Amino acid sequence: MSQGVVGTGAAAMSLTPMQLDRAIGTVVASAAGDALGSAYEFGPGLRDDQLPEFGVGVFGHGRGEWTDDTAMAMPILESLACGDSLDPQTLASIVSRWVDWSTTAKDVGAQTRSVLGRLGDCSEESARRAAREVHGRSGRSAGNGSLMRTGPVALGFLEDGREPDLVEAAGRIAQLTHFEQDNVDAVVLWSLAVRHAIRTGEFDPTVGLEWVGASAEGVSTSSTSSEDSTGGGAERWADLIDEALAPGAHPRDFQAHNGWVVKAFQGALAAVAGASDVRDALIRAVRGGGDTDTVAAIAGSLAGAVWGATQVPLGWQRLLHGWPGHTANDLTGLAVLAARGGRPDSVGWPVVDAVPSSGFLHTAPVRHPHDPGVWLGSQSALGELPPSVGAVVSLCRVGAAEVPEGVESVRVWLIDQPGRNANLEWTLADAADVIAELRAGGSGQARPTEVFVHCAEARSRTAAVAALYGFYRLNQRGRVGLERAWRDVEGVLPHFAPAPFLADAVRRVAASDPKGRTGKTGGNHEPLDAAAERIAARIASDLGRLRGTGLAYTVDLGHAFFQAASYDGDQVLIEISAERFMPADRPLAPGSHKRLMQLGFSRPTTRWPNWWIAMEHSSDDELLHAARATTTALLTVYEMSATEVAEALGMPAPDREQPTEEAGRDAGVRVQLRAEERPDGSWLHLCVPR
């Protein structure tokens, strides 16, 4: 293995706001998973109706405090944030920081502690030698400690063509403490999946298979490990990935031995693959049991890269803290610098003390029309806060010292330009929620506090969030009226001018629940109109007929198809076309993969080549939810009209009068079940005679 310099930020790529959101998510979501899981470490799996909460960790970590998983990632992240190349000198500095941390840490993994205790000095070579010795003494060294800290490594290698450098860097860092080849393979696969997700927003854990075995001089697990290692390189890892992505797979399935890097990899992968958003992925990981903080930290690094930091609830981010004295705001700044090769932006953010605002419109603090404990104003008003203000919610960039000392700083990633926010509706709802939380004294704060909400000019973003918060307040009092909330906010903001795309998004949020607070985790879709609801009801009815038959069916949609199958008793699987089965002149639009995952579909795999939803219990509600997700996908992602879908299902056109709901559902040619086994025998499918 090369011992030379692996550069990081010499020519850092220019990142879009969405890509930066995802880069930050890699770090913040991992820390959130770590802290959430710390209270459940080494415990049994949780039921699906049990919601994990932040609490005191098994090893005494405070509420919201991250553990060794994130602590060991910090020196890597900080080095990348400085623009350092991962040369032997930098790796020696990382090892030295680990040694310092371990002397006071509440918990250090047994294998890591053993390696650090054998160091002659803190050089890379000394660490590798000690890791090799630990492996030789025990015959194995494939704990999950290398994978838990690998998330930030990808941030230094986001530019085109940097895959070989990332592969080498991830492997070298892994073998500072964990020498076995399984560790190298796992971190290479995970780091490349994180890199791919940050760059594209797509979840693809197979993107690194071609690089398996290309880095480091690890020890083969085929003969030395007592776990189920069998060697096999990329083919073996492809099978392991398919196991984690199988329909209905859950982190609980990999709880046994999830201190082993392979099972931790699979458990974290199952957590992300079956999730609808970051929060759902972390909750699934913790529900898996066993080494919950580590599996959730690993899952968080990939989930955050797929969906972005803006999906980590601000109420969770307020709690996050840990060695070496960082908070979620610090993690954000470090992640941005790491992704930019150590360089701040044109105004010096995130390292500058204050973001220049002299050219911005000024709005002095004014009280919110529906809550006198909430103040609204511009960024330039941060120097004239009322003394009663205990927290600032910033909807724009703020400098490191811009919020007065002693005042809590909550920072919201909200870009005042259309098409630049990965999770716009979620972000708006989350901003309004955190204001309410601060006002109520939530997330462990001692008492309710007054809040100052600002953007650069109190013109657009502040107006939008203030109107949504006002709408929520009016609803609490039984007076529903978004337009009234807009009018009242306009009455107090002198430069009120919300961007149209933000105003539209606020209306969508007010009409639905983008954060899924109803408790459902299986996908998010807009309310369906009458024609689409009839289509969903028809699909749900056909799925109900399929349940328990052991059969399947396919519906030809012209340029695409969807199909469903009954398997393992009452379980039902529904699939919808992957792009490779569609005509070249009808590709899916950019962002389609993310939208399908938001709807609850899991990504295609080797075994399951299409987008799919598995219904474990196949209750009527579960079938209807999947049918609505499928209908939404067909109408929006696959850009079909309701008439086209209805005709493919043998239903009357939506514009024809429907005498009754039952008559509409049963009219036309019903799906006819006909068994036909696939060549690979993976499941039976049926065809609709055309």
Image (cartoon, rainbow, N blue to C red):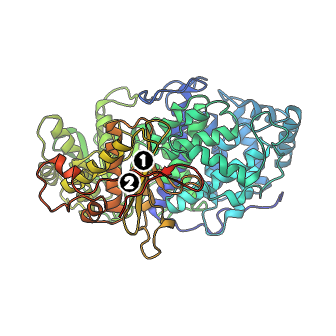
Residue designated by label 1: 311
User: Residue at horizontal 64%, vertical 63%?
Assistant: 9
Amino acid identity at mark 2: Asn
User: Residue at horizontal 52%, vertical 24%?
Assistant: 56
* Residue situated in front as seen by the camera: 608 or 495: 608
Q: How far apart are marks 1 and 2 (CA)?
A: 7 Å
* Residue situated in front as seen by the camera: 225 or 70: 225
Residue 280 in the image: state x and y as whole percent: 45, 40
Residue designated by label 2: 423
Is residue 515 among what the camera can see? no
Locate the N terminus and report the quarter of the image it occupies: bottom right
Residue 192 in the image: state x and y as whole percent: 63, 57
- Secondary structure of the residue carrying numbered label 1: helix
Contact between marks 1 and 2 (CB within 8 A): the answer is: yes
N-terminal of the two: label 1 or label 2? 1
Q: Residues within 10 Å of mark 2 (few under 14, many from 20)?
A: some
User: Residue at horizontal 32%, vertical 55%?
Assistant: 632
Residue 357 in the image: state x and y as whole percent: 36, 61
Which label belongs to residue 185? none
